[in-house]
Image (tube, coloured by chain):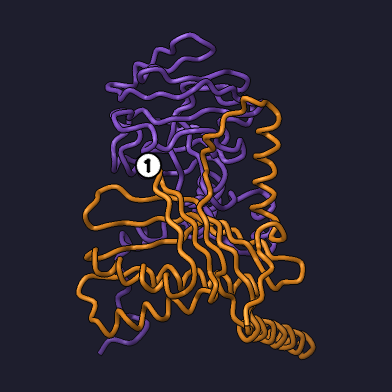
Amino acid sequence: MQSEENKPGPPSWLRTILIGRRPKWTLVRIVVLVVTCYIVFGFLLLVIRIEGPSMLPTYSTGRINVVNRLAYARHEPRRGDVVAIRLAGTEYNAHEFVHDLMRVRLNFDRLARPSVMYMKRIVGLPGETLQFIEGRLFVDGKVLEEPYVKSRYRWEMPPRKLGPDQYFVVGDNRVMAIDDHEHGVPLRNHIVGKVLL
Amino acid sequence: MRIFIRLLLGAAVIALGFWLWTVMFPSPEKLIRKRIAEVARLASFASGEGLVKQGLRVQSLANCFGTQVEVEIDLPGNQHHELAGRAEITQAAMAARQSRRWLKVELLDLSVVLAPEKESAVVNLTLRVRFPEQKDIVVQEMKFSLQKIDREWLIIRMETVRTLSRAGSDVGFAACYGLNLNLNRNLNPAYAIPRTDYD
C-alpha cells in the first residue's frame, strides 16, 4: 500500500505550465500584468464595439476599435479626427484611481466607463462658421472636401459660428434627413479621445 | 502576541460593524442608484410575459415615480413626448408592452448630485433602449430629478439632455454662457427640482 507522502502529484510539465518553474516570479509577472492592464485600459485606451449606422461606410456595426484617451493631452482635436464623445457620467480619473488604490481595490467596472459613447467626425473647429447647402458642408464659405462621405441627403443648415473651445461633429453616413442624424457641438470635456483604427 | 490578536480582532469587529452600518443604513446615493436600476429592470420586458405579471410590473414601475411626475422627451426627428402623472406612465408602459414583443432598457453611466439638504437629487445618465424590430438602438442622455418623499426616493421629473448641442453660437459668447448655464443646471439640483408639495 502506498503512503500519503508517496502519492504521485501532478506531472511536472503541468506544474510548469500552471505556475512556472519559479512560482515567485510567476506571481510577480501576474501582478505586473494586472497593474499594466489596469493602467492601460483605465487611462490610456478604451476598447469599444461600434453599434449603429451613423459612421457608415467608414465604420460598420460590430467592429471593434480602440479609443486613445490621451490623444488630446498635448494638442487640441483636429479636423477629420474621428472621436468618441461620452453622453452622461464622468470618466475614471486620477482622483478616483488614488481613492481605489487607498482602499486596495481594483474596480474593473470603472475601466469600461463611459459605457456608451457617440462616435463622430470633427468637421468644424473653434471660431469657424459652418453651413450645409444641398448636403455639401461649407466651412467659412468654402466647400469642405469629404472623401469619407459616399452618399448624401440634401442637408440644409443655416450658417453657425462656433465659439471658442467648440467643435462641430457629424457622422459620415448622411443618407438620412438632417433631423434624424445626431450632430452638433459637444462639450469639450465630453470628447473622450480619438478613435485609433 | 496576545495583544496583536486582540488588536486584529478589534479591527475585524470595527470593519464588520462599519459594513453592517452601510448595509442597514445605505447612503442616499446608493438608494438612488438602486431606484434607477429598479426602473430599468421594470421598464424592460421579455416576450411571453403573462397579463398578471405585466400588471404587477407596470404598477411597481409607476410606484417609482412621484404622483405628479413630469416626463419630457425630445428624440431625433423632432419627436417630442410629454407625460404627466403616474397614470400616464402606467398607460405608456402598458402600451409599450402591447406594441412590442420585448424591450430592453438600460440606464447607464449614472452621475448623482445630491442637494445639500440631501432631500433631492439630480441624476445624469445614459438611456439605451433595444427594440426587437430594429437593429439600431436608441441612445439618449437624460436627466432625472428625484425627491425623498415618505422615506422613498421617487422620480419627479425626467427629461432628455442634448449631448450634441445644435444651437449655433451666432451670438458668440452668449451661446457659451448658455451652455455653461445648462451645465450648471445639470449639476446643481437647486436649479432643476421644482419645489412642489407631494402629499
Q: Nearer the viewer, residue B187 or A135?
A: A135
Taking the spot 51% from the left edge, 35% from the top edge, the residue there is A68
**In the rendered view, would you say A55 is above or below B77?**
above
Q: Can you give x and y, in whole percent of width and height, for residue A75 in the image?
A: 62, 24
**In the rendered view, would you say A18 is above or below A187?**
below
| Palette colour of chain B | orange
Q: Nearer the viewer, residue B15 or B150?
A: B150
Q: Amino acid at mark 1?
A: Gly
Q: Can you give x and y, in whole percent of width and height, for residue B21 in the image?
A: 67, 85
Q: Is residue B130 left or right of residue A75?
A: left
Q: Nearer the viewer, residue B188 or A197?
A: B188
**In the rendered view, would you say B127 is above or below B15?**
above
Q: Can you give x and y, in whole percent of width and height, for residue A29 in the image?
A: 50, 52
Q: Quadrant of residue A51?
A: top left
Specify few, some or many for label 1: CA neighbours under 10 Å numbering under 14, 14-19, or 20 or more. few
Taking the spot 49% from the left edge, 67% from the top edge, the residue there is B84
Q: Is residue A153 left or right of residue A139?
A: left
What's the chain of the residue with tag 1? B
| Element type at mark 1 | loop
- Which quarter of the rendered picture does the N terminus of chain B lie within? bottom right
Identify residue for label 1: B77
Q: Is residue A162 left or right of residue A11?
A: right
| Palette colour of chain A | purple
- Which quarter of the rendered picture does the C terminus of chain B lie within? bottom right
Q: Quadrant of residue A162?
A: top right
